[in-house]
Structure formats: C-alpha cells, structure tokens
Image (spheres, grey):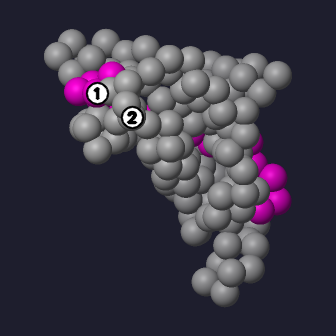
Amino acid sequence: MPTLLETKVETRRYIFPGQSNALETAHGGDLLKWMEQVGAMAAMRFAGADTVTVGLDDVRFHGPIQQGSIALLDSYVFRAGNSSVTSRVRGYDEDRHTGERELVTEATMVSVALDDDGETVTVPELTVETDVGEELHAEALENED
C-alpha cells in the first residue's frame, strides 16, 4: 500500500514573459494547468495506473507570482476511494536566489484511475506512516473545510 509521502510530487516552473499577464505576474490559467499536471502525477503514482481529472475544487489564489520568479508546485494524495484519488495541490512563489517560498495558490483535485480500456480500476488503500505524513494529511483535511 502506498504511503502519503510516496505520492508527493514537486516541480518548478520559471515565470517567463510568455507565462505572465499584463501585470507581469504568472497567468492564472498557466498556474491551473501546472497544478493539474502535478496533481495528476501524484494520483498516477499512487494508483499505479493512468488517471483522469474529474475536479479541481476549492481553488484559491492568495497572491501573485512575479515574472522572473519560480513557481514551485507540489501535490500529494490524502484520500482514496474505490477508484478515486483526492490530492492536495499547492503553488508557491519561490525566490530564485534564496529559495524562500510563500504559498500563493492551493486546490483539491479529484482523479479517477483507469485501465488501458478506459474502465475504472480499484486503487490501493492510502497509508500514513510518519509524523510528516500525518501533518500533511491533517493540513489537507483542514483545507477542505
């Protein structure tokens, strides 16, 4: 059975002018696309199968990411159903010189696991084995309220 920490995926994107809006901050549509991608990676890692996104819920933008900054995106699975997987997805503004980061966006993502014929498949049970995993699990549940 996969553990919560084994599902954690992290990636970074440099915010160039092509990913920026007229205010020279990261375009929300690009952030949503990257959030969906990192959430899908976490879901597939957990399910051991391809997944499709059925919802990106409770999306919140807390602040901008300036052009020239780094967008750090991470995701981990915190709930599993029969064939569904629920992931927490977060985006941070990461200073390219110091590595300091600030949470700027977050969402809950629901995916469904599929076989090669496009039929739903059962996903494993999620386990949480460490203190760090417990903290992340509790944060995700709190975020849903």
Q: In the displayed structure, would residue 121 be above or below residue 4?
A: below
> Which dot marks residue 67?
1
Q: Residue at x 17, y 16 (%)?
A: 97
Q: Give residue 46's mark.
A: none
Residue 80: x, y in percent?
75, 49
Q: Is 64 colored magenta in this rendering? A: no
Q: Check the image and report above or below for 94 versus 89.
A: above
Identified at 43% across, 37% down, the residue is 27
Q: Amino acid at mark 2?
A: Asn
Q: Residue at x 56, y 18 (%)?
A: 62
**On the picture, is 77 further left or further right than 97?**
right
Please rate how many residues cluster around mark 2, counting C-alpha atoms within 10 Å: few if below 14, some from 14 to 19, many from 20: some
Comparing 91 with 42, the one in front is 91
Quadrant of residue 65 in the image?
Answer: top left
Residue 38 place in picture, x, y as percent: 48, 47
Q: Answer whether labels 1 and 2 touch (C-beta < 8 Å).
A: no
Q: Quadrant of the C terminus?
A: top right
Residue 21's disc number: 2
Dot 2: element: loop
Does the rendering let one see residue 38?
Answer: no
Magenta segment: 66-83
Q: Callout 1 environment at 10 Å: few (<14), some (14 to 19), or many (20+)?
A: many
* Prevailing SS of the magenta stretch: strand
| Res 60 seen here | yes
